[in-house]
Image: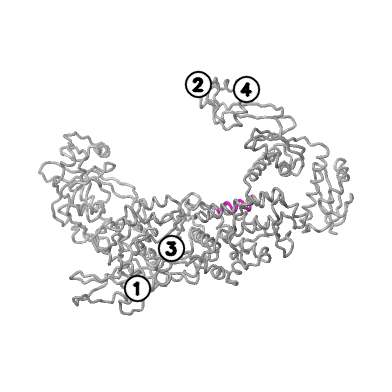
Amino acid sequence: MHDQVKLEKEVLGFWKKGKIYQKVVESVKDGKPFYFCDGPPYATGQIHPGTAWNKALKDCVCRYKRAKGFAVRAQPGYDTHGLPIEVKVEKELKISNKNQIEKLGVESFVQKCKAFATQYIGIISEQFESCGVWMDWNNPYVTYKDSYIESCWRTIHAAHEKGLLHEGVYVVPYCSRCETTLANYELEYGDEQDPSIFVKFKSSSGKNEYFVIWTTTPWTLVSNMAIMAHPVYTYVKVKVGGETWILAKDRLDYLMSIIGESATVLGELSGKKLEKLKYLHPLQNKIGKKCERKVILSDEFVTLEEGTGLVHCAPGHGMADFIIGKRFGIDAFAPVDTAGKFTKEGGTYHGMPVREASEKIIQDLKEAGALVHSGKVLHRYPHCWRCKTPLIYTATNQWFIAVTKLKEKMLEQIDNCEWHPEFAKTRFKEFVSSAPDWCISRQRYWGIPLPIWKERHSGHVKVIGSAKELPKMPELHRPHIDKIKLKAKDGKTMHRIPDILDVWFDSGNAVWASLTEEERKIFPRTDFIVEGKDQIRGWFYSLLGSGVLLNNEIPYKALLMHGFFVDEKGEKMSKSVGNFVPLEDVTGKYGADAFRLWSLSNTVWDDLRFNWEEIKEAHRSIGTIYNLGVFLSRFCPLGRKPVLPALDELATEDKWLLSRLFATTKACSEAFEGYQPHVAAKALRDFLVEDVSRFYMKLAKQRIDEKKGTCPAMAVLYKAVLDSLCMLTPVAPFISESIYQSFYRKREHKESISLLAWPEAEKAHYDALLERRFEIAREIATACASCRQKAQIPLRWPLEKVRVVSESTEVLSAVEHLSALVESLSNVKSVKITKQPKSTITVSVNKSKVGAAFKKESQEAILAIERQGPGAIEKWISSDEKEFLAEGKFKIQKDMVEVSETAKGYEIARFDGGKVYLKTEIKKPLYEEAMVREVARRVQIMRKEKKLVESDKISLGIETSDKKLSPILKKHSSKLASQVNAEKVSFSKGAGFCKQWEIQGAKLAISIEKK
Ligand SMILES: [Zn+2]
């Protein structure tokens, strides 16, 4: 019995004990180098099945390359720094803000983070290993090691040398809980309900005029510095109550409809005319900031899709606002502290968390008579990717890498890489085109310290590129490095910028930081990376930025992008949602090979939907392949490697299988070369399960059986299974290795299947015409099977003949050449190509379909169809024509009619290219043959129950008083004996194992005894 889970344990043990991975690596060490760089996952517990899919993709490419003789560098990596770990440690320590961390001590906190990041590495490596992933598990790269940190410093140093590192005030997304900025690609968008308010700002002209603006962040009104208008749009002055309001013409109806007022238009003016008009802040007496506020123009940030066409501008709290503010020299006023609360400059709101202050501000606006309308809006809003707090945008002092200066080179370098699929490249270019400067500083603890020292007064800066430039310290993390002070040229003391690096910077340097000094010379770039589509904003980007910065080059030569792993409905799988299926649940039940075969068959860049049925199906396929191994072991002569005879000594089906093997080998090799493992996985599964096991075995089994495995069919089967197992190894390494060990190893002599070279596709075996003819023969056999089903005649009953009617020369010549194959597949005595036999064709019209299409004229249409005559309709239905024009007027579709054909004594079925007429009448000799087979089948069942093997002889006893069955069996007793390997047949109650049966209403008792 096939027990895949047990089989995998044995194979894992064999690999470990025999150091097979090391031997395979050793065997290709002189080959062409191939550097695969692992995108490092976080080691924070159990692995997600999506991560297992990701690693299986990596593994199957590396295994393929090794089989092709490449010296593959496959070092796994782990991401260990950053907020994900800090947040988990804070939870463990039951603390929730930076003050508590400082109180506990940074040293102690950092050590806890380090311990946390380390504890799971071994466990996770083992999980990957048990999925058959072959990498250097004893030597992973870990981002917190000093050598890794130094490598990242080198890049920062290079940025400084090239004038690409700068400090500046910038509006960045900020998490008030984590008290740190986040990069654009760390934002997690989710629905959030916020206020949606319309506010009027009184003009300073002294007239009763107001500018109407709209905002969903009332708290930013505290920092309002200007109003933006579009220079070209048309604005209107309207009379509402006793006041004059100004807003965009196209937004007037909308505003009036939500406030339920009517307005009289007093006049129109272009946005340009609004420029420099001054206004008063409605909360001036509540806020501290006094300044002159006016209307400014912007054609890029004012739209007519929402709001009023007049945009509230707070340069301290919006990216667009900041850019415009800079252009007009407006202060980026941001009265918010590091904890996200208003500072003293926030006036009456001092001390309030900003988002919570919104309600109070709305109340104050109402009291000031400035609130036009207050509602709610549900919109997509950015949240902190770790703690899910809604973010705020605020102007802070940060360090940047000037990506905008590198952008041209980055975009150009994107073409210097092979992209799979091509659309990943398009999406990536779009993302890179709009990327702002990279904010690399984070105000946290557990990460690579920023290697920047600064003298407070002169602003003089020194950037360190190597630890050798610093005094010795226990490790390069905080707080040790914080204590180091450097001397500026003028003798003044320089202090380190207390920030750490954005954790994406760590993995962005993986291509070099994971290598040794010597390796860096061999591998300026990695040959291949593969990650999910979310990495367009993540790793693909941080790698590109760092690579162009350091070496003027994109650091990867080929990239494969995979989809998301989602649940059956397409939703993200996560523990908190409750739709999570642990990997062990799958592999513990069906084995890692089933998971791999299933997941690797999914088109790489499509999302992979979890599906138990499909995994079960993959497991069944693995079982079918396992049985091929069992068959080979049983029938192949001991210790002998069958030699493939010359082509002309082979039977047609042998030639066909070799041709299919050629096509499969070619398809697989091309698929792996083009980084499309799913194409290879599907081709191999089809070949082994459908072509070899379900089809070829049916035809060749008897020959192999009779010749005790010494016939050409065994040699063909031997080669077909060995070559395809070699190619299946990257996809399902366990079953491939297991069959190799139990059967092939003593004949092929290499210690593991992974030590065999990738098979060559043998062109001489290719025969396209033969493959096409087999395809047709299989279609005809399928049509015959459907006839049998209609007539309820089992396949094991031989029938007299089948007639094939076709106008296709391809079909006719296939039947001519492969008549014996069609006969054996359909279990008929003869197949004949004939003209259309006499038959009755009836056409029934689907009245509801016709009615729906022709309405009033449907009655006329039905008559028109009927007048065509069944022959013409039948001919059209069998053709490729989609429509039939009845009487020059009615376009008839195929679903409007149903054609049925009957012929006396026959069942009829269609196939692609023709029809079959299966003769269903059973004459006496055929009936007798069928009865013998029915009895033989039952004897075989009993032999199986008694666990007899084919070569065991039996004596057979049959007892029946049925007047019809008894003489038939007596007449054919020698035939029956040979079918079940019986020495003799007696027609009385025999000795041994006895069972009662019923065949076509006749009762009989069968007994068998081993001789
Ligand atoms: Zn946070």
**Residue 684 highlighted magenta (yes or no):** yes
Q: Is mark 2 within 8 Å of ligand 1?
A: no
Say which residue label 1 marks. 477
Closer to the camera: disc 2 or disc 3? Answer: 3
Q: Earlier in the sequence, mark 3 or mark 1?
A: 1
Residue 153 picture location, percent across and down = 33, 69
What's the CA distance linking mark 2 and mark 3? 70 Å
Which of the two discs, 3 and 1, sits closer to the camera? 3
Please name the amino acid that badge 4 sits on.
Answer: Gly
What is the three-letter code of the residue carrying label 3? Thr
Mark 1 vs 4, N-terminal side: 1
Image vertical order of residue 648 relative to residue 495, above or below: above
* Residue assigned mark 2: 856
**How far separated are the C-alphas under marks 4 and 3?**
70 Å
Q: Secondary structure at mark 3?
A: loop
Which residue matches tag 4?
A: 869
Query: Residue under circle 3?
Result: 526
Task: Determine contact: label 4, label 3, CB under 8 Å.
Answer: no
Q: Quadrant of the C terminus?
A: bottom right
Give amino acid for label 2: Lys
Residue 529's image quarter? bottom left
- Mark 2 or mark 3: whose residue is earlier in sequence: 3
- Ligand 1 located in image quadrant: bottom left
Q: Which residues are magenta?
A: 680-690
Q: Nearer the viewer, residue 397 or 773?
A: 773
